[in-house]
Each structure stands twice: as structure tokens, then as C-alpha cells.
Image (cartoon, rainbow, N blue to C red):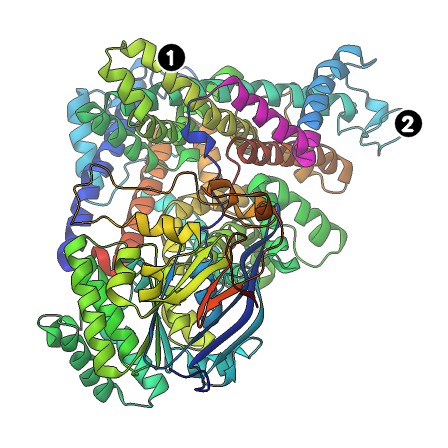
């Protein structure tokens, strides 16, 4: 009340200085930075480990069935004698691929849908948002399973199905943000002075959406990881001998005596999900300091 | 008024500090003043002057991160450091407060009747029925039409001015000795403002109340008050009887405030304002907090400046003033 | 009040109709028929199958007949268990199908809501205490890590290693069998409730009208239970609508972990057998539940908020 409020950055036109200060705030957030590093390292491991490993992820070894972790097999082996270390990281690769691809589609659809509804407004806005309301009424898991059953069970389709039901939140957020930007003085001034719609959208609307989109992207990726893992529990999505974290956890849950089958992928997934959560928190704090 | 009389409210060296992210903020700095029975004291200053925080501190209503030190004696009783239970016996009964924003100061989820009767049931041990009758009487008194029925409505069913009347009626239920009014008219439009001031003036006569009136508007002070405290950046800058302040303002800040009163006698093209921005309490300069905006600034202004008595009950804190240091 | 309730129910009918139509046409416009994958059927057998499932009729006729079935409370006939009505699979006489899922969801709500509210209120009243920090961080943890990870971990520790509970199965719905699934679900959802309650308590206690109540000299208890409780609880109530849909799905996932005979098994079987009618039924049933629960939440909200009352 008596301390002058700092300018709320989400409300002001974005400048280079703004992004510099966001970055410096983020850099000072140790938890978020550590989380970011963990994500990068895990992603690299998922690429590198399967490439340079001496055993293939689908190489069965009947002499090495259900071995607990050892020097030869760091994470142990599964019921077919396959090396779990390699499988965890190839599974991670698949999981990340699905998650990033789905998140990309979600962001793309969500931003366009929300921005159009918010910017055009009027009847179109009402109709578009009504559609979103209707889709919100469907429990997402069942709808996703319905889509996969209809269009066939493949990895590519499973991420399309996940994305198809996950863009709703994004579109709502973007629409709200677009509406508020539209009524900001600097945008209204641009409209009055005859700047073209295209220029207003690219110069003012999109840059101002960037903050919220970045935060939401960091939240969407882990959501997609969870969604694809949940589908694995229903026997959908990735199929053997290829694997994913969800499939590995589901396998582990059915072979509890071999604890490493569950603990290895579960630990990797928990670390990943928490890292994304902390990174998203850090990004939000950096973009909107209060 | 003789100095021997015991003041109703005796504030000495009151300091209010807040712990915030960037350190400690001093909202009020060693504030001392006395209020005698029947007075209307105006406390004037811009936002950040500490005028509201000092009054909230007296009522024990500071936010969680606020710390208070010094002494506040009300009817001879020390209030600083007193337990909440003991304070609850006093506030709402012998002293009451009304707030700036009538739209949010009443609980939107409770009926007016419920919010009013609870005061009487708590402090005067009345039954609900008696308390309701008393509440309706008081609503009538503050000129709420059809009070008998409207007492059963929710706050959002009243206009802003009506809500402030309800607030006033609620605070007067127990006939408090002291009423603290924190900018009660700021959020209202001008005609309603005048009606509320008129009402306060009448009620004060009727109930023999003492009022502390917080405002940033010197015009309101001129209309209503007997004395005025001018505050800036958490410090008391000048205090005197109202006639003296208007005749002989000493502090340049007081002079600047007086110059902002729009006058009907002269044709003025523009409303006058004080140049510069209200102070940032995190970065106050050493010495006088007003020095950066002062038109009469001198080298002495960066030194520690004591309060000086110019004449009886006219005290000022300015490096360039004469008078006896207190 | 009644008017509002009726209006609220009427408004949700088009939504439900839209969902049903979307699901129906999605399924029926997609090329191929559900019997494609089956072992080679003789043309006559296929024809009679198609007739039995009305697939030989024009699509709009199928649609109207399906709507007619739904209005009469029937979800049609299973495409896997030939000739068996879906209703008998979804709502069996013994414990199973929908009843399992519903019971899990209801137990979760009954425990998670008061539990979360109490934890959140305590945390909000003692902001920045160790307990408050625990509530905030457990919210971060349990919103990030889903039941499909926590569930198996609980089974590994509490059931397999410590042998405290059975690792799965419904038993006869007894405490021991239900403890772990319900625990997993409660832990997944109560931190969110606690977190929202905490935030709303903090907001309310900082509000001007609570300051007024303090200025009146009211004792703390009275301020909390008379002035703060209603406004603090409202955001939690509006959270419950979307949360119920989440719990329903969460319960289905939890069934998979604990091998409970609920909607989860039916969904998996339907997906692997391409039993379209069954998946449609489950999807529509889920939507109906979500919509009904949202109506209940809205009515509850209206009861508590005097601003909406008129």
C-alpha cells in the first residue's frame, strides 16, 4: 500500500530489457536452474545411451532373466533378460518424443484457437468457447481411448489423440490473455492509428502471449508424459518390444518381487516430472515477479 | 483547553515497521500527539505518509508483518503490547473505526442485521431482538430509508454512499468515545461526500464523540476539524490548531498542501498539485523526508531535524523554522 | 432458487446432447466396421450382425434410435459379448463395473475434501510455518507425480515389502482391500484442495471486511467461523466440479494398478476388442456424471453466495 508497486511485467509491452531481466531472475532461481539442467541431462542421456550401449534394448538373454542391478546391468534385467538400463533410456526417448510432439501440437492448436477467439471476439468467440465448454464435459481419458480405438493403436496416433483433448486449457488461457491485451492502451492506440491486424498480432499480441505460453509449455510437457504413461496402463500407445516409461512402470507394477523393474523407471519419471514442475514455477516467478 | 486535562488518546513515540522482502520499512516514525475529549483531529498526508498505518496500529489492526513500538494510552490505559482479548474489550466498544472503501469493508456474505447486531450482543450483552431494534434505530439516524426492512439485506444491495452510512451506523452502535475515520469519503462522489461529512459533524455533536479524521484533502480538514497533524514519509511534520495552520503554515509541505485546495474566489485554470512523487519508504533520504520536493531546501535539510515548538501546541519539524527544540 | 436450478439443468442438456452426438458420429463416420478384424465371417453372418447392431440403417436413423435407447436408460448391446446388453456389464448385480468406480470416487471425495480443507485451513492460519511449507510442497509433489507412479510405489512398500495390505483385488470391498487404492487417490487430490483452501484463507484474512470484524472487537473464533468460513470455502467448492471428473478418471487408473474389477477393466477390454458401443457408453456415462456433479456444485455455490441468489 505504501510501498510503490513494481510494474507488472505481464501488462507492459515486451522489450529486450524485459527478457534480460526475466532471464537474470530465472538464473538466480537455483531450484529452477537445477531442474532445467536435469531435464537437459536426461534428454541427452535418452539420446546417447541407446546409441552407444553395447546391448540393444530388445536383445533378450535367457541366461540373464530377472537379474537384480549389478555391474553388468546397472538397472538389472527384466523377465526376458533384457538390460533395463538401456530400456529405461530408450523408453525415456520415446516418452519424450511423444510428450514434446504432443505438447507442440497442444500449444499450436491452443494458441491459434484462443488467439482467434479472443481477437475476433463477438459471435465467433461465443461459438468457439462453447465448443471448448462441451469438450470439457467429456472425461479426457475415455475420449482419448475412444479415439485410439477408432483410429488404430500406434504411437503416432496416440500422441495425436492426447493432443486432441489437451489443448482446451491452453486455448482458454490464450483467449483470456488476448482479450486483455486487446484492451490495453498501446494496442487500442495502434488500432485507432490504422495499423493492420496482422501487424498488431505479430507486434503486440504474440509477444505479450509469449510469457504465458512459455510457462504453460513447461507445464504441458509433463502432462503429456503422464497422459502417455496412463495410456500404457491400458495397453495403448507404445507396444512391445519398444517401450516407454509408462509401459516399464506398468510392467514393474506386475512384477513386484523384482523391485528394480518398478523403481528404475518410476524414479526417472518422478525426477523428470518434478524437474518440469520446478522449472515451470521458476519461469512463472521470473515472468511475473510479485 | 488546559494542558492538565488528561487526554483521551495519548500517543508517544509510536513507530510502525514492516518486514518486507527488501528489508525493514518504517511506515511511522516516532509519532507523538494527544487528542482531547470532543476534538476532531485531522491527519493529513499523501499516500505513504503513515497516516493510515499509525491509526491501524492504534486499533491493533496492522498486517501480520507489522511491528509496533512506543506508547498509546487510551483513557489512561496502555494499548501497546496488550493482549488481543483485552484489546477486544476496547475496540468496537469505546473506540471504533470506519474505513476508506465501503464496498469491501462490509462482509458481502452476511446480512447487515447480522453484522450490526453482533457488535451490541458482544459489547453490551444485548439479546438479538434488542440489538436489532437498536440497529434499526441507528440506521434511521444515519438516514437509511426504510431501515426496518433494509437491515435484512446484504451489503451488495446498497449503494456506496449507503454502505458508508451503514458502516458509520455500525461503528456508532456502542456510542464509542473515539471514532477513527480513515478517508471515509475518498471512494464516494462529491455530493455523497458532503452528505457524509455533514452526518459526521451532526453525530459528533449528538454523541459527544471525539473523531480522528484521516484524509489527504486539506479542504475537508478546514471544514471539519479543530486540529490537524500533517504527516509525510512516516514523520509528523507539523501540528497545530486549524486556524493557526491556515493563518501561519510553517512547513513548506503544509504550505504546499494548502495551495492544493481549490478556491472558489479565484478563477483557477488548473488544480494545483505538489510536484514530484510521494516518497518511497525504502529509500528515504537522510534528514527531512520532503527535501527532494521542497522549494525551500537548504543544506541543513540533510541533517537530523528535531521537532520544534513555535508557539503553544504548534509544533513543526523543519530545518528552516525557528522555535524551541522539543 | 428453484428457478435457478431448473435453468441450470436445462442449460446443460444441449451440452450433453452435443457430447453424445460428437461421440456417436465420430464412431459411426470413421470408415470400417467393428467386425473387420474378426475372423472371416460369412456374408450372411456379417449381414445379420450388421442388422442386429442396426449398422445397415442410414446413419441418421441409427442416431435417433441410439438417442431413443439412451432416453430409456439403455446403452445398447456389447459388440464383444454378442447380444449382451451393455447395461448388464456396466451395472452388474454384484459388485463390479461402474459400482466399483463410483464407490472409489465417492470414498475419495468424502475423505479428501474435509481432509484437504482442514489441512489447508491450518496451513493458511499458520502461514510460513513448517506445516504450511509441508502442505505447499506436498501439493507440488502430488500434482506433479500421478497416481500411476505413486500407486505402484505404495504397493511395493506397504503391500509387497511390509505385507500390511493386500496388493490388489476387491476382496469383498473390505477395509484392507480398499485402504491402499483410496489412500493413493486421497493423496493425489487432497493436496490440491488443501492448497486452494490455504490460498483462499490467506486472501480472506487479508480482506477489508475481516479487518472490520477485528475492529469491532470480535474474538478470533467468531471471526473465523462466522466471517471467514463462507468466503474461504467458496473457491474450494468451485474447484470440486472439475476435480470430480479428475477423480473419476483417477479411480479408473487406480483400478488398473490394484486390479479392481471396475470401469477400468471394461475400458481395457473394450479398447482391445474394439467394442465401440462399450467405449461410447463409458464415455457418455462419464460425461453425464461430470455434468451432474457440476450442476450440484453450481447449486451449492449459489446457496452460499448471496450475490447470485437473486
Compared with C272, B239 (above or below) is below
Q: Quadrant of residue C149?
A: top right
First reached walking from the N terminus: tag 1 or tag 2: 2
Left or right: A175, with A232 as reference point = left
Q: Residue at x 83, y 13 (%)?
A: A54
Coordinates of residue C161 in the picture (x, y in percent): 76, 51
Q: Nearer the viewer, residue B132 or A143?
A: B132
Which chain hosts label 2? A
Q: Is residue A196 magenta?
A: no
Q: Does the rendering let one see residue A106?
A: no
Give residue C68's quadrant in the image: top left
Numbered disc 2: secondary structure: loop
* Number of residues whose C-alpha sits closer than 10 Å to that of mark 2, classed few (under 14), some (14–19) or many (20 or more): few
Taken as a whole, is the magenta stretch helix, strand or loop? helix
Q: Is residue A20 magenta?
A: yes
Q: Residue furthest right?
A: A71
Residue toward you, A91 or A290: A290
Q: A282 or C175, which is in the foreground? A: A282
| Residue occupied by mark 2 | A71
Q: Chain of mark 1?
A: A
Q: Which disc number belongs to residue A202?
A: 1
Q: Quadrant of residue B82?
A: bottom right
In this view, the residue in front, C135 or C76, is: C135
Disc 1, SS: helix
At a point 44% along the width and 36% down the height, the residue shown is C267
* Span of residues in magenta: A14-35
Query: Is the residue marked by circle 1 packed among few (<14), some (14-19), or many (20+) residues within 10 Å?
Result: few
* Location of residue C247 in the rendering, given as x and y in whole percent from the top left corner: 45, 47
The residue located at (84%, 31%) in the rendering is A67
Q: Measured from the top left, where is residue B147 in percent x and y?
A: 12, 74
Give coordinates of residue C244: x percent, y percent.
Answer: 40, 48
Amino acid at each position: 500500500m505504501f510501498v510503490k508497486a513494481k510494474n507488472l511485467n505481464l501488462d507492459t509491452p515486451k522489450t529486450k530489457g524485459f527478457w534480460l531481466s526475466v532471464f537474470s531472475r530465472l538464473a538466480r532461481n537455483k531450484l529452477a536452474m537445477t531442474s532445467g539442467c536435469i531435464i537437459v541431462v536426461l534428454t541427452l542421456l535418452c539420446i546417447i545411451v541407446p546409441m552407444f550401449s553395447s546391448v540393444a534394448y530388445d536383445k533378450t538373454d535367457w541366461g540373464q532373466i530377472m537379474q537384480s542391478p549389478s555391474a553388468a546391468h546397472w538397472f538389472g534385467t527384466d523377465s526376458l533378460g533384457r538390460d533395463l538400463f538401456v530400456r529405461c533410456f530408450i523408453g525415456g526417448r520415446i516418452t519424450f518424443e511423444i510428450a514434446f510432439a504432443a505438447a507442440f501440437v497442444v500449444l499450436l492448436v491452443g494458441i491459434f484457437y484462443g488467439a482467434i477467439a479472443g481477437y475476433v471476439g463477438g459471435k465467433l468467440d461465443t461459438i468457439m468457447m462453447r465448443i471448448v465448454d462441451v469438450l470439457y464435459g467429456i472425461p479426457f481419458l475415455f475420449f482419448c481411448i475412444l479415439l485410439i480405438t477408432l483410429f488404430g493403436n500406434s504411437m503416432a496416433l496416440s500422441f495425436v489423440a492426447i493432443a486432441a483433448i489437451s489443448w482446451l486449457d491452453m486455448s482458454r488461457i490464450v483467449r483470456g490473455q488476448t482479450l486483455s491485451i486487446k484492451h490495453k492502451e498501446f494496442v487500442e492506440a495502434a488500432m485507432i492509428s490504422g495499423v493492420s491486424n496482422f501487424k498488431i498480432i505479430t507486434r503486440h499480441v504474440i509477444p505479450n502471449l509469449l510469457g504465458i505460453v512459455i510457462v504453460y509449455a513447461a507445464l504441458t510437457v509433463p502432462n503429456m508424459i503422464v497422459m502417455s504413461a496412463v495410456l500404457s496402463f491400458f495397453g495403448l500407445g507404445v507396444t512391445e518390444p519398444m517401450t516407454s516409461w509408462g509401459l516399464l512402470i506398468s510392467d514393474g507394477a506386475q512384477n513386484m518381487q523384482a523391485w528394480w523393474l518398478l523403481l528404475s523407471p518410476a524414479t526417472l519419471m518422478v525426477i523428470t516430472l518434478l524437474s518440469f514442475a520446478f522449472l515451470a514455477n521458476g519461469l512463472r516467478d521470473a515472468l511475473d515477479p510479485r | 483547553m488546559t494542558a492538565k486535562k488528561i487526554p483521551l488518546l495519548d500517543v508517544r513515540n509510536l513507530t510502525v515497521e514492516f518486514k518486507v522482502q527488501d528489508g525493514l520499512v518504517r511506515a511511522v516514525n516516532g509519532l507523538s500527539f494527544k487528542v482531547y475529549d470532543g476534538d476532531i483531529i485531522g491527519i493529513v498526508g499523501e499516500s505513504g505518509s503513515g497516516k493510515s498505518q499509525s491509526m491501524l496500529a492504534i486499533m491493533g489492526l496492522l498486517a501480520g508483518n507489522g511491528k509496533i513500538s512506543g506508547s498509546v494510552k487510551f483513557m489512561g490505559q496502555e494499548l501497546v503490547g496488550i493482549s488481543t482479548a483485552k484489546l477486544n474489550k476496547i475496540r468496537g466498544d469505546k473506540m471504533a473505526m470506519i474505513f476508506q472503501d465501503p464496498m469491501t469493508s462490509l462482509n458481502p456474505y452476511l446480512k447487515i442485521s447480522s453484522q450490526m447486531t453482533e457488535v451490541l450482543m458482544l459489547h453490551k450483552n444485548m439479546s438479538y431482538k434488542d440489538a436489532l431494534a437498536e440497529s434499526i434505530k441507528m440506521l434511521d439516524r444515519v438516514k437509511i430509508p426504510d431501515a426496518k426492512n433494509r437491515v435484512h439485506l446484504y451489503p451488495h444491495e446498497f449503494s456506496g454512499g449507503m454502505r458508508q452510512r451503514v458502516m458509520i451506523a455500525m461503528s456508532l452502535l456502542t456510542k464509542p468515545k473515539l471514532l477513527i475515520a480513515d478517508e471515509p469519503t475518498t471512494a464516494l462522489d462529491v455530493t455523497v461526500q458532503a452528505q457524509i461529512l455533514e452526518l459526521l459533524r451532526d453525530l459528533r455533536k449528538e454523541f459527544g464523540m471525539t473523531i480522528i479524521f484521516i484524509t489527504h484533502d486539506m479542504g475537508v480538514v478546514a471544514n471539519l476539524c479543530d486540529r490537524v497533524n500533517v504527516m509525510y514519509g512516516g514523520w509528523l511534520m507539523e501540528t497545530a490548531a486549524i486556524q493557526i495552520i491556515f493563518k501561519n503554515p510553517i512547513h513548506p509541505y503544509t504550505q504546499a498542501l494548502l495551495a492544493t485546495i481549490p478556491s472558489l474566489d479565484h478563477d483557477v485554470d488548473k488544480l494545483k498539485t505538489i510536484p514530484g512523487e510521494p516518497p518511497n519508504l525504502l529509500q528515504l533520504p537522510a534528514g527531512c523526508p520532503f527535501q527532494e520536493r521542497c522549494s525551500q531546501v537548504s543544506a541543513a535539510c540533510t541533517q537530523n531535524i528535531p521537532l520544534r515548538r513555535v508557539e503553544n501546541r504548534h509544533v513543526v519539524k523543519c530545518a528552516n523554522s525557528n522555535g524551541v527544540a522539543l | 432458487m428453484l428457478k435457478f436450478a431448473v435453468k441450470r439443468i436445462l442449460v446443460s442438456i444441449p451440452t450433453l446432447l452435443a457430447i453424445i452426438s460428437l461421440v456417436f458420429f465420430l464412431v459411426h463416420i470413421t470408415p470400417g466396421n467393428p467386425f473387420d478384424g474378426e475372423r472371416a465371417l460369412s456374408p450372411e453372418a456379417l449381414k445379420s450382425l450388421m442388422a442386429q447392431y442396426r449398422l445397415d440403417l442410414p446413419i441418421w436413423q441409427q442416431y435417433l434410435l441410439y438417442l431413443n435407447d439412451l432416453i430409456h436408460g439403455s446403452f445398447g448391446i456389447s459388440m464383444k459379448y454378442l447380444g449382451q446388453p451393455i447395461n448388464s456389464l456396466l451395472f452388474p448385480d454384484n459388485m463390479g463395473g461402474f459400482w466399483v468406480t463410483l464407490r472409489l470416487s465417492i470414498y475419495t471425495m468424502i475423505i479428501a475434501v474435509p481432509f484437504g480443507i482442514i489441512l489447508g485451513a491450518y496451513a493458511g492460519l499458520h502461514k510460513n510455518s513448517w506445516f504450511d511449507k509441508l502442505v505447499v510442497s506436498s501439493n507440488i509433489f502430488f500434482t506433479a507425480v500421478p497416481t500411476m507412479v505413486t500407486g505402484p510405489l505404495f504397493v511395493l512398500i506397504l503391500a509387497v515389502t511390509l505385507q500390511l495390505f493386500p496388493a490388489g483385488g476387491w476382496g469383498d470391498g473390505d477395509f484392507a482391500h480398499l485402504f491402499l487404492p483410496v489412500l493413493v487417490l486421497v493423496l493425489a487430490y487432497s493436496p490440491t484442495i488443501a492448497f486452494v483452501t490455504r490460498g483462499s484463507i490467506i486472501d480472506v484474512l487479508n480482506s477489508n471486511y475481516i479487518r472490520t470484524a477485528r475492529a469491532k472487537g470480535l474474538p478470533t473464533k467468531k471471526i473465523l467461523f462466522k466471517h471467514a468460513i463462507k468466503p474461504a470455502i467458496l473457491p474450494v467448492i468451485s474447484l470440486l466440479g472439475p476435480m470430480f471428473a479428475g477423480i473419476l478418471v483417477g479411480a479408473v487408473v487406480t483400478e488398473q494398478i490394484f486390479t479392481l474389477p471396475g470401469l477400468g477393466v471394461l475400458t481395457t477390454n473394450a479398447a482391445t476388442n474394439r467394442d465401440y458401443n462399450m467405449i461410447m457408453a463409458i464415455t457418455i456415462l462419464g460425461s453425464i456424471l461430470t455434468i451432474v456433479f457440476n450442476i450440484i456444485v453450481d447449486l451449492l455455490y449459489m446457496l452460499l453466495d448471496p450475490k447470485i441468489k437473486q
